[in-house]
Amino acid sequence: MIGNRYIAEIAGLIGDSARANILFALQADDQISAGELAIIANVSNSTASEHLAKLVQGGLVTFVKEGRQKYFKLRNEAVAEILRNMESLARITQGSSPELPKWDHVHVHARKCMDHVAGKLGCGIAGDLIKKGHVSLDSNGADLSKDGERWLEGFGIDPAKLRNGHRRLITVCPDWVENSPHLGGAVGAALMKDFIVRDWIRRDHCEGVTRITPKGVHGFRQEFGLDLRVSGQSS
């Protein structure tokens, strides 16, 4: 029987919030560079490297090298299964869904899930793209249609570059708050970066939160048909 000390060591590796973000990102997106994982975990590049070294040493994560770049991935399916079981346990212990912090409505609209948008905004975007046929869902997960590729190009994002990257092109994440999916993977990350560049959303000082700007309220309504106005707010 494996001693409790080793079980505690593995639990300690997963228990750190930054490392948990890294592990769950790798579960969803196959293999990701250290720089991207630093963004996902909301830490500096040097801190991300320290966390990754611990995860590699602990046997949870491995990496492949392409030139001078390292791409990290979960060691095997057993690690992914542990993460899925932990997520299921979290759902049981938290009840139907985690209690929301007492943010205002704008914050709840635009929660951040790793490096992509969640909450009402993220789920609304996913729903609109699925409805328009830009994103398809089946038993194998999500994929980007040809119409979706053309839409991304028109939006200023190169789908070919995303397909040639090392992250899974597109994933869907179940959103505990909205009870519907939002988009992750390379497409989800690219959209969030674009929204920030357009000044449609801004990162908030509160971890895991973004703020929709007045410009974003208009933009998301025009592009995705979403009404994200807060009561009493005009645009």
Image: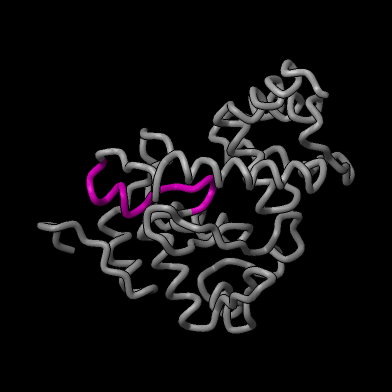
Count of marks, rendered view: 0
- Answer whether residue 125 is magenta in the image: no
The x and y percentages for residue 116 are 51, 52
Which image quarter is the C terminus in?
bottom left
Give the image's coloring scheme. one colour
Q: At x 53% / y 35%, what residue is drawn?
A: 42
Q: Is residue 93 above or below residue 97?
A: above
- Residue nearest the viewer, comparing 177 with 220: 177
Q: Residue furthest left?
A: 232
Q: Residue at x 42, y 58 (%)?
A: 198
70 w.r.t. 5: above or below: below
Nearest the viewer among 92 and 200 is 92
Residue 175 in percent (x, y) is at 45, 56
143 vs 230, left or right, is: right
Q: Report which quarter residue 65 is drawn in.
A: top right
Residue drawn at 43 percent across, 53 percent down:
176
Using the image, determine if residue 215 lies above or below residue 49: below
Q: Is residue 106 magenta?
A: yes
Q: Position of residue 159 (x, y in %)?
A: 65, 69
Figure check: 132 above or below 170: below
On the image, the x and y values in percent for residue 141 come to: 65, 68
| Viewer-closest of 11 and 62 | 11
| Rendered-image quadrant of the N terminus | top right
At x 63%, y 64%, the residue is: 170
* Residue with the most extreme top position: 5
Q: Which residues are magenta?
A: 103-116
Camera-side residue of 31 and 9: 9
Residue at the farthest front position: 1
